[in-house]
Image (cartoon, helix red, strand yellow):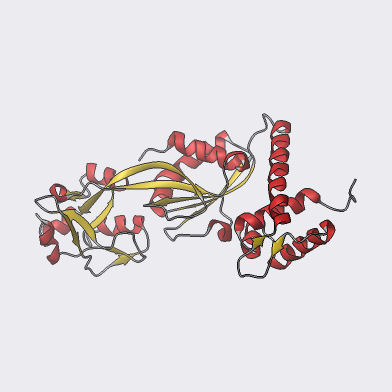
């Protein structure tokens, strides 16, 4: 038997996370350790095993043959530990702090109204919610789940689609009364078009012409905003014309607070909403799985 002061399972987990993360610094962020502590632990593990596991001769970590074999064995060990813990904790309620980062419109109009139901269902979970339209690094921000709109960038994160909504162009009646109602995309050249202050995957307002060919109208105006909800409020105040997801402004359209424009030229594209997170399957914490299942059950876009 090994010496009792050695946490063998902890060493195995750190080594596996280093390999999966691709660097000591990335693994350190994920494990909430310092890179120097990670480096010392790996060096101590190699000294105890009497074998070099990771080659440090290049800028990227590269496994030695012994390291590859140890990684494969480590994955099996961690899977067995997970299975043992799940069996021991069968029937236990999800618990712990859940950190959620969410884009502002979804947070205000969907997430926050649903949180009381979630917390009532899972009283041993506490939620820390941050609303921002800025894209974050989940590991650096220590978030369990991020909820984002639009196409997903390629990453090592796992995504679960929550829904999608058609995009629409809208303006307030007061604005249209003062500036006139555009009848074609060309008419927008004389209007104030509201913009976001961050980079979007589409640079302009997309339309189709009378023959169905794609047409992009540059966004020219005197206002930029930080997030979708600020865009909605600015539009409601009569400052200009905006393009937003239909689910976000549908109550305003139904109540007459906003008017839908240029539908005959709408390309019909839809904006998806995803929950993205780290880990999957048996490695997903119970609190995260419970939250994702709750969103899939309750969210309607």
Question: Could you say which quadrant of the image residue 166 lies in?
Answer: top left
List x then y, in percent, for residue 16: 68, 52
Identify the residue at horizontal 42%, vertical 41% (top origin): 162
Q: Position of residue 14 (x, y in %)?
A: 71, 55
Residue most extreme to the front: 65
**Image quadrant where residue 185 sits:** bottom left
Q: Nearer the viewer, residue 13 or 149?
A: 13
Q: Residue at x 56, y 59 (%)?
A: 141
Q: Is residue 159 above or below residue 49?
A: above
* Quadrant of the frame with the N terminus: top right
x then y, percent, for residue 191: 15, 64
Q: Nearer the viewer, residue 120 or 264?
A: 264
Q: Nearer the viewer, residue 57 or 280?
A: 57
Q: Residue at x 22, y 63 (%)?
A: 193
In the image, is 184 to the left or to the right of 52? left
**Does 24 appear above or below 126?**
below
Which residue: 64% across, 59% down? 27
Q: Is residue 227 left or right of residue 182?
A: right
- The spot of residue 132 in percent (x, y) is 44, 58
Task: List the single residue furthest toward the top.
Answer: 91
Classify residue 151 as left or right of residue 295.
left
């Amino acid at each position: 038997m090994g010496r009792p002061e050695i946490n063998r399972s902890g060493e195995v987990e750190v080594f596996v996370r280093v390999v999966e993360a691709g660097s000591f610094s990335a693994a350190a962020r994920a494990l909430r350790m310092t890179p120097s502590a990670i480096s010392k632990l790996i060096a101590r593990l190699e000294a105890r095993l009497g074998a070099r596991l990771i080659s440090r001769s290049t800028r990227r970590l590269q496994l030695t043959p012994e390291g590859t074999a140890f990684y494969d064995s480590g994955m099996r060990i961690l899977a067995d530990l997970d299975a043992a813990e799940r069996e021991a904790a069968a029937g236990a309620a999800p618990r712990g702090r859940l950190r959620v980062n969410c884009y502002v419109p979804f947070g205000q109009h969907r997430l926050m109204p649903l949180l009381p139901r979630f917390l009532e269902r899972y009283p041993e979970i506490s939620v820390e919610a941050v609303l921002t339209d800025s894209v974050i690094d989940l590991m650096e921000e220590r978030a369990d789940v991020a909820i984002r709109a639009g196409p997903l960038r390629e990453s090592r994160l796992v995504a679960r689609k929550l829904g999608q909504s058609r995009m629409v162009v809208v303006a307030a009646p007061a604005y249209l009364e003062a500036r006139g109602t555009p009848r074609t995309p060309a008419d927008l050249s004389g209007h104030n078009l509201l913009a976001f202050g961050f980079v979007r995957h589409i640079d302009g307002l997309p339309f189709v012409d009378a023959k169905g060919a794609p047409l992009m109208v540059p966004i020219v105006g005197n206002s930029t905003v930080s997030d979708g909800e600020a865009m909605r409020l600015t539009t409601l105040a009569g400052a200009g014309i905006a393009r937003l997801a239909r689910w976000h402004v549908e109550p305003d359209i139904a109540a007459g607070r906003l008017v839908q424009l240029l539908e005959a030229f709408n390309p019909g594209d839809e904006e998806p909403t995803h929950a993205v997170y780290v880990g999957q399957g048996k490695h997903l914490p119970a609190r995260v799985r419970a939250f994702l299942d709750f969103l899939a059950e309750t969210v309607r876009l």
